[in-house]
Amino acid sequence: MTMKNMGFRWYGSKSDAIRLKDIRQIPGTTQVVGALFDIPVGDVWPESEIKALKDEVEAAGLKLEVIESVNIHDDIKIGLPTRDKYIENYKQTIRNLAKYGIKVICYNFMPIFDWVRTNLHYPLADGSTDLAFEHKMVEGSPEDIIKSVEDNSNGYVLPGWEPERLAEVKRLFKLYKDVDAEKLTANLKYFLDEIIPVCEECDVRMAMHPDDPPRPLFGLPRIYKNREDMLKIEQLHESKYNGFTICTGSLAENPENDVPALIREFVGKDRAPFIHARNIKFFGNEGDFHEAAHLSSEGDLDMYEVMKALHDVHFDGYIRPDHGRDIWGEQGRPGYGLYDRALGITYLNGLWEAIDKEERE
């Protein structure tokens, strides 16, 4: 028995070398996790483009029920007076997505950078490469990291690192200078109080992604790092529509986080409709890591225990393999190649089938 809502993140036929027919051939894959990447952050997503994406995915024999991401405009995170305009646009986007069967929106509330890695092609002993993070590499200016990402992305635009966004980094740092964790949390509450009633009307669940890595960077606050943060966010607006994406890799980057326990708690009380499953391997220095193949033996996260936790709480939401290695000569978008993520799906479904049969005996 495979997981019924196994998905695969896809960047669209205009900007992804991976084809929908390739995804369709991965056994047990039923969902595409998609987005409209050409809509400027803060604008309303047009119904016509949502429909076109859905039609394209369904024509390939797959479903489109999760969007990752409808990005949050920085004016909302900073708390500028202009935020109300962008929140109204966000509400309309939720309504438009709901008309076409979208059930979950994955989003994040990270200032400026959605995620940070210091090496997009870290070499592994088997000849593959993957993403890595070393804190000593981010002690300089953010411009150094930006240049490194742009120079090593194989010509692809990476999520959260869009050129028009990065061109404004210096201006954004000035705007964020007075935004600490407390103020960022208050701005999140303001946002949630506005949009969650619309989500409830439309039956669209918000699933906030953890900070990646789960630690302050460049003096910018992080507010979704651990269980304590999750409890605070949950209480900002009590509703199952105010939920979480549990990214096993992001949360595990803090070795104090017990990822299976977080799954049992938050999936168990129906507050985590979306799971990103990936493994990581720590370097010797605390908090430094590289990503790894999904197998438990390849990293420091026990993926059997992750899947067992999901099974124990009868998870029936959406899941996808997260970042994969570049293997077999593939030179795609770093972290988002076809082959290793396909292997990840096969492995995760194999674990699920074994756990399911074991439970039935």
Image (tube, grey):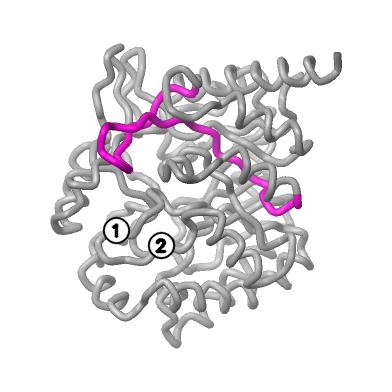
* CA neighbours of label 1 inside 10 A, class few (<14), some (14 to 19), many (20+): some
Q: Nearer the viewer, residue 74 or 15?
A: 74
**Residue furthest bottom as drawn:** 81
Q: Nearer the viewer, residue 86 or 99?
A: 86
Q: Amino acid at mark 1?
A: Leu
Quarter of the rendering containing residue 299: top left
Image quarter hosting the C terminus: top right
**Residue highlighted by disc 2:** 222
Q: Is residue 187 magenta?
A: no
The numbered mark at residue 306 is none
Q: CA distance from mark 2 to mark 1?
A: 8 Å
Q: Nearer the viewer, residue 234 or 58?
A: 234
- Magenta span: 269-294
Helix or strand or loop: what does disc 1 sit on?
loop
**Residue furthest right as drawn:** 361
Q: Is residue 272 magenta?
A: yes
**Residue highlighted by disc 1:** 217
Compared to residue 40, the image places residue 135 above or below, namely above
Q: Position of residue 86 (x, y in %)?
A: 51, 75
Q: Is 239 left or right of 162, judged from the image as shown? A: right
Compared to residue 266, the image places residue 306 above or below, namely above
User: Which residue is at a point 58% across and 49% down the rendered structure image?
Assistant: 245
* CA neighbours of label 2 inside 10 A, class few (<14), some (14 to 19), many (20+): many
Q: Position of residue 44 (x, y in %)?
A: 55, 67
Quarter of the rendering containing residue 215: bottom left
Q: Position of residue 174 (x, y in %)?
A: 24, 77
Discs 2, 1 touching: Cβ within 8 Å: yes
Q: Position of residue 186 (x, y in %)?
A: 51, 78
Compared to residue 61, the image places residue 187 above or below, namely below
User: Which residue is at a point 65% across and 31% down the rendered structure image?
Assistant: 6
